[in-house]
């Protein structure tokens, strides 16, 4: 199944929202207040530093942003591609089109172009696929939540994530992109995950890495048949 990409759609990736990284809250509030115009919203994954339906602590910590997103979903068509920091989200965002990792890429069309959207952590290897299945398993997560007395596990995870430096320039990124596009047949491939904000033309395909809202303080807008990055 594919959807139609609309002019003035925006793409937001890798905000890693926490008490230190507030950019995701800022952009959502600006959309709500009509300071940023858009026709569609594509959330490309890892917009929360951590969020899963089964883990009570992080749902409470992100309550304001969850409510804000759900409010926006009454007025906007929103797609949420789950990442490696935010998953099992469909019960949290019931009016948002949530796309699980195993259902990515999400396919779009614009005129005669076919477009594939992924968070960017698919097509890795079977070891990583197994890891992803384990950490997304609801029974496993509910068990962790049961063990999380006084939220001691969640608080340790939160602290570790807040202290992690996630903004790096990958000097091998073009080589990686050349490998990744081989997994796609579409004309345009759009991913987040890598925090590089770079685009490449490889053969007949175009590859776009959406900027990290946390690292580059920018997002991507589709306007007049072109993908352009805009500063927050």
Image (cartoon, rainbow, N blue to C red):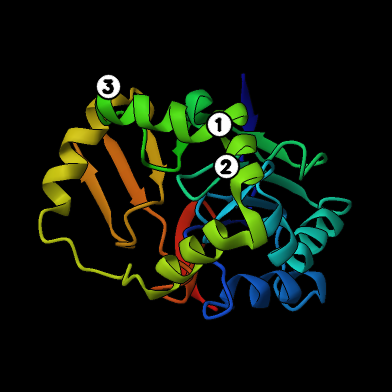
Please say if 114 is above or below 190.
above
User: Residue 110: percent from the left, percent from the top?
Assistant: 56, 36
- State the CA–CA distance, disc 2 to disc 1: 6 Å
Residue at image position (55%, 79%) is 232
In terms of secondary structure, where does tag 1 sit? helix
In terms of secondary structure, where does tag 3 sit? helix
- Residue closer to the observer: 132 or 196: 132
Mark closer to the observer (2, 3): 2
User: Residue 156: percent from the left, percent from the top?
Assistant: 48, 64
Contact check, label 2 and label 3, Cβ < 8 Å: no
Contact check, label 3 and label 1, Cβ < 8 Å: no
Residue at image position (35%, 50%) is 208
In the image, taking residue 25 as reference, residue 173 lies left or right, namely left
- Residue closer to the observer: 165 or 176: 165
Q: Quadrant of the N terminus?
A: top right
Can residue 48 be seen here? The reply is no
- Residue closer to the observer: 148 or 167: 148
For residue 51, the mark is: none
User: Residue 44: percent from the left, percent from the top?
Assistant: 52, 49
Residue annotated with mark 3 = 126
Contact check, label 2 and label 1, Cβ < 8 Å: yes
- State the CA–CA distance, disc 2 to disc 3: 24 Å
Residue annotated with mark 2 = 144
Residue annotated with mark 1 = 140
Residue at the far top in the pictured view: 1
Residue at image position (37%, 42%) is 120
Please say if 8 is above or below 79.
below
In the image, taking residue 193 as reference, residue 149 lies left or right, namely right
């Amino acid at each position: 199944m594919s959807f139609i990409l609309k002019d003035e759609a925006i793409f937001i990736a890798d905000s890693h929202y926490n008490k230190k990284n507030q950019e995701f809250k800022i952009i959502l509030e600006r959309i709500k207040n009509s300071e940023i115009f858009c026709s569609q919203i594509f959330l490309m994954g890892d917009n929360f530093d951590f969020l899963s339906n089964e883990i009570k602590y992080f749902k409470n910590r992100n309550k304001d942003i969850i409510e804000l997103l759900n409010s926006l979903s009454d007025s906007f068509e929103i797609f949420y591609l789950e990442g490696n920091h935010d998953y099992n989200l469909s019960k949290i965002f019931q009016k948002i089109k949530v796309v699980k990792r195993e259902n990515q890429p999400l396919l779009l069309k614009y005129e005669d172009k076919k477009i594939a959207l992924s968070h960017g952590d698919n097509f890795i290897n079977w070891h990583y696929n197994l890891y992803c299945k384990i950490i997304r398993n609801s029974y496993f997560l509910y068990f962790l939540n049961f063990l999380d007395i006084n939220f001691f596990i969640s608080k340790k995870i939160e602290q570790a994530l807040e202290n992690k430096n996630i903004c790096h320039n990958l000097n091998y990124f073009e080589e990686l992109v050349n490998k990744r596009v081989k997994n796609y047949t579409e004309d345009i491939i759009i991913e987040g995950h890598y925090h590089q904000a770079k685009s490449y033309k490889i053969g007949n395909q175009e590859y776009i890495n959406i900027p990290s809202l946390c690292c580059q303080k920018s997002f991507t807008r589709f306007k007049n048949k072109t993908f352009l990055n805009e500063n927050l």
